[in-house]
Amino acid sequence: MIGCTATEERGERMAFEIGRGTNISHWLSQSKSRGAQRRDWFTRADIERIAGWGFDHIRLPIDEEQMWDESMRREEEAFDLLAGAIDWCATNRIAVVLDLHILRSHYFNDADVPALYRDAGARERFAAIWSDLAGLVDDVPDDRLAVELLNEAVAPSAHVWNETWRVAYDAVRARSATRTIVLGSNNFNSYDTVSGLDVPADPNLILTFHYYHPMFVTHHTAKWWRQGGSYAGPIRYPGRPIPESQHRALEHLKDDGIEQLNRDFDIDVMRRDMGLPRSVADRTGHRLYCGEFGCYEHTPSDIREAWYRDVVAVFSELGIAWANWDYKGSFGLVDKNGQETGVRRWLLEER
């Protein structure tokens, strides 16, 4: 376990304890694979490997469209895979953060305000999904599984997000008073919006944020990053990510927050950034969790290593539990063929 909270100092120790983990992406979330292809993407052998490396938990994203049809009937194969993964984790003493990643009414990259924030029926379905999931995991011990209400909220305001997450929170609490709930901040789980949460006085609660800064380093040439993924020139870390000699290549981004995106960046900036959610967690007496962070595979290796080593050093200093994005994929501990990439070593081994 990383860190201690005011709640624990008062003797209200939470059953669910985590320190370092990894995200199981593109399996029950953000994937069109079904049948054998989906079954083979992530298996018991992967959990055994993760445990053998010294991780203590996984964050397991799931999507509504994989788990339920539009009539809220369970997709049995997906639920069988989910139940199997929870069992594999229990056997290997790996905890699970069950993350509701994408809804039919909420996708973090939607161009328009997602229906979840506009439609009462969508909120009712959000609550129904969590009532079903909470019932599914009723028999999983509290120290083995926590639930994360929604990935990367993009509500139009803090007020709207606070109104929205509360319906899911209440649905979970109607089933269990002691299941740990992971509550994320608005605007893509940003570190600087945790202060906008109306944090309940609940000892079984973890606050979470994500960290991918500076984006010109962590998403170098990532085509899905609209603001800067088209830039393919040299970058650096630490320092200003894009050197002055390359600024002409950024002319088309001048109206898109380029100065903030290309600010000087080093471990001290990370400390200041993450100090914001740390102060909220200290004030409210809750644990703090960075549920996603990572650096894209096309970022130069020496820069990736420096960035990863700095970010986990700050997590350690500030008592922040973490899960990297991701286990297998373009940010992964292993590539799509299961071969190690070097990220595990940068995360877990000293220089």
Image: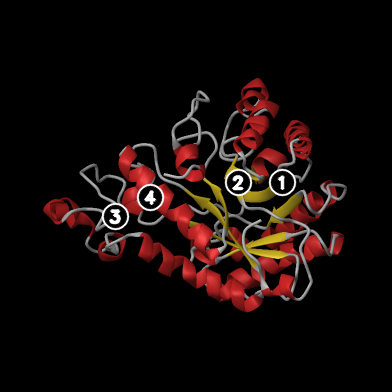
Tell me what residue is drawn at x 71 percent, y 40 percent. Answer: 67
Q: Which residue is mark 4?
A: 307
Q: Amino acid at mark 3?
A: Pro
Q: Position of residue 167 (x, y in %)?
A: 73, 66
Foreground: 35 or 14? Answer: 14
Q: Position of residue 100 (x, y in %)?
A: 65, 50
| Quarter of the view holding residue 130 | bottom right
Looking at the image, tell me whether mark 1 or mark 4 is earlier in sequence order.
1
Q: Secondary structure at mark 4?
A: helix
Circles 2 and 3, Cβ within 8 Å, touching? The answer is no
Marker disc for residue 238: 3
Extreme residue toward the front, this view = 351
Q: Which residue is mark 1?
A: 95
Compared to 232, does 149 lie above or below? below
Let me know if residue 195 appears in the view: yes
Marker disc for residue 22: none
Is 97 positioned to the left or the right of 24 in the image? right
Q: Secondary structure at mark 2?
A: strand
Local crowd size for mark 3, using a 10 Å CA cut-off: few (<14), some (14–19), many (≥20):
some
Quadrant where the image shows the N terminus: bottom right
| Quarter of the view holding residue 321 | bottom right
Circles 4 and 2, Cβ within 8 Å, touching? The answer is no
Tell me what residue is drawn at x 16 percent, y 50 percent. Answer: 249
Q: Amino acid at mark 2?
A: Gly
Is 217 positioned to the left or the right of 70 in the image? left
Marker disc for residue 21: 2
Looking at the image, tell me whether mark 3 or mark 1 is earlier in sequence order.
1
- Cα separation between marks 2 and 1: 9 Å
- Cα separation between marks 3 and 4: 8 Å
Compared to 48, does 129 lie above or below? below
- Cα separation between marks 4 and 2: 18 Å
Colour setting: secondary structure
